[in-house]
Amino acid sequence: MPRPSTNRLRQSLDQIARSLLMCLAVCALLVVGACKGEPRTMQVEIAVEGMVCDSCAEAITHELERLEGVRAADVSYDRGSAVVTYEEGAVEVAALEEAIEGIGYQAEPGAAEPAPEPET
């Protein structure tokens, strides 16, 4: 039969082991949560054909900014393009193209890239 001090030592070691397992579980949850993180902010420039005035650009801006996930749309008649800033995974570039084409313009998206960091 083990001595009483051995039983206490064993109980203490069991408590320490349970505490360590609990800490590891909490850390694992924190790491998984941190990996998900915030969605990346992306930006794409879309060539737009068919605009004849600034009102056209305003109409396209309105349509794009109605889409969930779009943070900003800078549409320019002079440039003939739309620069759209959006949340990755919340909206696809194809949906941006469809929104523009859905109101009567031709759209040709470029490659999406991470949006530049805002200046402070």
Image (tube, rainbow, N blue to C red):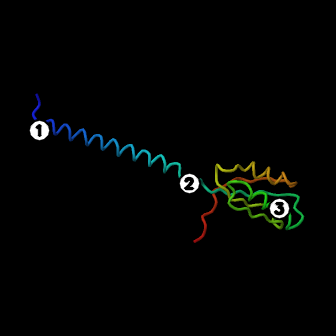
- Residue at the image point whose x is 53% and y is 49% from the top: 36
- Does 15 sit above or below residue 34? above
x, y (%) of residue 64? 76, 57
* Residue 96 image label: none
Query: Which residue is the site of mark 2?
Result: 38
- The one nearer the camera, 95 or 77, is 95
Q: Secondary structure at mark 1?
A: helix
The x, y position of residue 70, in whole percent, is 69, 57
Give left or right: position of 86 versus 14.
right
For marks 3 and 1 on the same chain, the one whose residue lies earlier in the sequence: 1
Q: Is residue 55 above or below residue 4?
A: below
Pointer 1: what residue?
5
Packing grade of label 1 (10 A; few <14, some 14-19, many >=20) is few
Give the spatial CA distance, label 3 vs label 1: 81 Å
Q: Amino acid at mark 3?
A: Ala
Mark 3 lies on residue: 59
Quarter of the image with the C terminus is bottom right
